[in-house]
Amino acid sequence: MPRHRYHIPYTKPTRAIIRWIWGELRDNRRQALLNMVLGVAMVLLDLVFVWGTKLAIDTATGQAHGASLAVVSALLVAIILCQIAIGFASKWVHALLGVKALNGMQRKVFGHMMQSEWNGLDRYHTGDVLNRIEKDATQVINFVTESLPSLVTVVVQFCGAFIFLFLMDHMLALAIVILLPTFILISKMYIRKMRSLSREVRQSDSRIQSLVQESIQHRTVIKTLQRTESLLSRLYLVQETMRNQVKSRTKYSAVSSTIMNIGFATGYLFTFIWGTYRLEAGAITYGALMAFIQLVGQIQGPARSLTSYIPVFINTFTSAERVMELEEIPRETVDQTPELTAPLGLRLSDVSYSYRPTDGGDSAPTTVVSHLSYDFQPGTVTAVMGPTGVGKTTLIRLMLALVHPEAGHVNLYDATRSVEVSPATRAYFAYVPQGNTLLSGTIRDNLLLGDPKATEEQMKQALQMAAADFVTELPQGLDTLCGEQGYGLSEGQAQRICIARTLLRPCPILLLDEATSALDITTEQQVLQRIAAQSDGKTVIVISHREAILDYTTHILRLG
């Protein structure tokens, strides 16, 4: 199996990534705001709880007067109950709105992929695209809906705890805060390297998913070639590469965390020693000492959290870059479908087209169509024939405006006007591509893709026209389930259902690209004969290698 050339992403400017993430935040501002409000409310309750515990201890030791221990205890219980309620609400916001936000982003990216130019995804492996839509989109959504609101909460907690501690002992508060920036600045030296390592890890993860997906998809070929062990070895090598990358990233992260932990331990030890000396000197109460310890935790906790956001930011920026690359693939411009009256013809005028390398190499483009002119006249049945590689399938892509000619024109015309083909003119084409293109689901589901409004009688007529009458004899008939790529049906059966699906599409031009390649000669003749006899003025273009189709065509175009 040939090695796929992966697209290596480039590093986008940080400002561009921030603007893009800000746009995603605006799209999901309701959930982000709810999470932020709940988080800030939890912080305020924590600070009130610190004050309450100090008051309770001082009241119990007789160092505070005018307060009832029962009232203070009831207050602490009420605070705990409120914290439990906020935690419950946070879980619901995360579960309900979080899934909605993720679904929205995945739907947006998926929709962009489906509406993008046909050859825009050539430089990406399917597994890589799926990895970006699933994992990278999840990382971005979690960041804008969970991490950013949490960051605001952390900052509020830090500021609130510092002010509280400053009011109690401003020297201690300043000493604790002064220690932190030194260690945070030291950890910054690792950010650039961490971002590079995170990008490499995400790329390796995409390679693993691509290899697994492709191997499962082509497992029959791999089994018959007896190359399972080779694929396992290749998977092991990619996994080993990713493991080494994760090891390097973890090493840098561990060094940064160790530096920060030293700072936190120093600050906590300083607070404890300072507090005990102040307590011994009678400058503070036992309640104040407990409050010191809790408040230092509430200062160091946010500071620790702030450092933990460094890898979160790095991973998010990496994921955002990868999703942004997909969104930068140009969309097709779909205008209003031009008004044409059947029967329609299709004219190629001095058309040329070349495929360019997708790996970024310097190899020359491969010309597959060169100065081709031909007129597929309205109501004709034309066979397009020629050896492999002469551009027959490319010709279909040009007709459907999936690719655009480098020179010349492809025009659709009726008795009064002519228009150049575009995504909008696909409404006039019914197309059966090569191979088995059934989707998982029932036969009915597949047929309704051709015409969602088709009646059961129309579906049966299309099946009969495609020589797929066997469907009506199946135990569940049209509701028979098909697996991925028509699993459970033979290639010939699946291909005939695909033809029936296309015949349900009421279009004046029918394109068949090796659509009967899996059929025996007798069945193929039966299908082509019925299509030719019941085309009702349609313009039919059939690509095939078999000379037998000439018995049912009115014209022939030989390429090469």
Image (cartoon, rainbow, N blue to C red):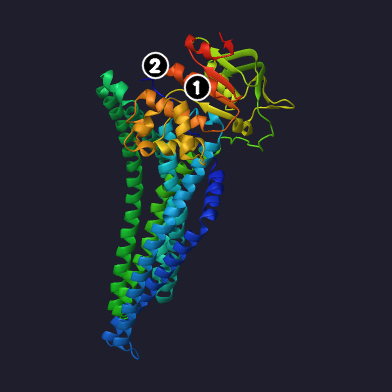
The residue positioned 45% from the left and 48% from the top of the image is 140
Q: The N terminus is located in which quarter?
A: top left
The residue positioned 48% from the left and 10% from the top of the image is 548
Q: Secondary structure at mark 1?
A: helix
The residue positioned 28% from the left and 88% from the top of the image is 62
| Three-letter residue code for mark 1 | Arg
Q: Nearer the viewer, mark 1 or mark 2?
A: 1
Give percent across and percent down for residue 360.
51, 23
Q: Quadrant of residue 237?
A: top left
Q: Which residue is mark 2?
A: 520
Residue furthest bottom as drawn = 66
Q: Which residue is mark 1?
A: 530
Q: Quadrant of residue 336?
A: top right
Q: The C terminus is located in which quarter?
A: top right
Q: Give above or below for 95 relative to 524.
A: below
Which comes before the other along the chain, label 1 or label 2? 2
Q: Give above or below for 14 relative to 123.
A: below
Q: Secondary structure at mark 2?
A: loop
Q: Mark 2, residues whose alpha carbon is within 10 Å: few (<14), some, or many (≥20)?
A: few
> Viewed as shown, does residue 319 lie left or right of 557?
left
Q: Mark 1, residues whose alpha carbon is within 10 Å: few (<14), some, or many (≥20)?
A: some
